[in-house]
Amino acid sequence: MSAALDLLRWPRRPADPARLALWTADEIAAVTGGTAYGEFQVSGVEMDSRDVRGGDLFVALKGEAMDGHRFLEAAFANGAAAALVDREVDYPHVRVEDTTVALEALARAARDRASARFIGVTGSVGKTGVKEAIFTALERASRGSAHRSVRSYNNHVGVPLSLSRMPPRSRFGVFEMGMNHAGEISGLTAQVRPHVAVITTLAPAHIENLGSMEGIAAAKAEIFKGLQKGGTAVIPADVEHFAILRDAAKAKGAKIISFGRAAHADLRLLDAVPDGAGGSLVTAAMGSMRLCFTVAEPGEHWIDNALCVLAAVHAAGGDLGSAGLALAEMGGLKGRGARVRTKVPGGHALLIDESYNANPASMRATLAQLGQTPATRRIAVLGSMKELGDFASAFHAQLAEPVLAANVDHVVLVGDEMLALAREMGKEARHPLGKGPSFAHCDNAGEAIAALQEYGLAGGDAVLIKGSNSVGLARVVNHFTAREG
């Protein structure tokens, strides 16, 4: 039967008769040990009152500095159907002793009732993009029956929230897991209990807390602790500490699919050439299979990401053809590679929005990508890379080499840690063999906006904006893109 006929006939599946409501009042009360006040059904779960949509369950979480119960009125004004609270309120609700514990219980119940294949994704770089690509491939192949964590909901609150939102009819669930300390992924993978555990790559992110690359490898390998019996580990073949990941997966009894450029990779890159539109035409081998596909996302790092995606989709029992189409159609995510054209004097400038995160590996990759981007001038706004500890000064200074290699014309450096690169750039500018790019150092995003305005953007410019999220460079992106239209 052809794929087209299969779609037209839309065969029924065992889960089709299942109801569409996400949770009922009685179910929420039963799994959380709470008491329901009112009869209701909810279609979603949300913890931020600003993001509540009609039919959502608003979970009033309490933290050290914030109490979600203060935002009940706003949540219901936005359409909440009910709330999960630890006190009596004048709205439909389920009352529990602790809303954080109750959310975790709701997540466990969602995980237990699902017959889906679960995929967990972690890694030093590329988690969110890879997670989105895996989801897009599985969503296409399953005709809308895939679920994933949205945004970067990958911590001790985001993972249970994402699990609690999973419809019982889902066939696949894709969950991102992040960390900055040892032991954190152990707790997250115990909640997700994946059938496929994916590590995108290893890089010196969070090295301040983990001490060494070996420590980072061991912390990422914690994802295998939650792997289901007979599960598959998808790991990068090209990283220095491949053996740590391989041995941790073997200790769990996992099947292993390694991906990369190394000769020992199970899914191995054979060739990659530019496609003429900024992406790549890729050929890879998996056993006797030859895979030829297009990667729309620019940059060498996305070739590696694509191999990771294909390996994960294959391990989850998904369709590789759908994965190829997903990779060919994907665009950059906001804060993570989105490309926006904005009106400036003389035409339009291209803004590459990488404002959400930064570490030494991703900085080098995106600077190389900037260097390959056709432009009249190349400009880089680089914010501090956080959580590098005693390594911070050296890692920032070492960015001088990729900046020069990318033929950047002007650099705006933002944050105290970037003073090390400013000093290095000063040396390069005085180098007898050539003139380096002009540069300015700023304390914050507001000053970076002023520095860019003083430099003057013009038609044909390509501007990379990248830094750790806490530096706030999204403000720079928003300032210049808001002028469009």
Image: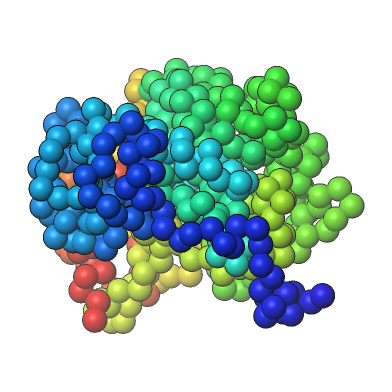
The quarter holding residue 272 reads bottom right
User: Is residue 44 placed above or below 31 in the rendered structure?
Assistant: below
Q: Is residue 170 left or right of residue 380?
A: right
For the point 72% across and 59% down, the residue is: 320
* Depth order, front residue of 159/383: 159
Residue reaching furthest to the right: 288
Residue at left offset 72%, top offset 65%: 321
Left or right, 137 with reference to 2: left
- Residue at 70%, 37% (x, y): give it: 232
Whether residue 314 is visible, yes or no, is: yes
Residue 239 drawn at (x, y percent): 64, 33
Q: How many numbered marks does the figure carry?
A: 0
307 and 433: which is toward the camera: 307
The figure's colour scheme reads rainbow
In the displayed structure image, the side of residue 278 where residue 434 appears, left or right: left
Residue 436 visible in the snapshot? no
Q: Position of residue 11 (x, y in %)?
A: 69, 70
The C terminus lies in quadrant: bottom left
Name the residue located 41 percent from the left edge and 62 percent from the top edge: 338
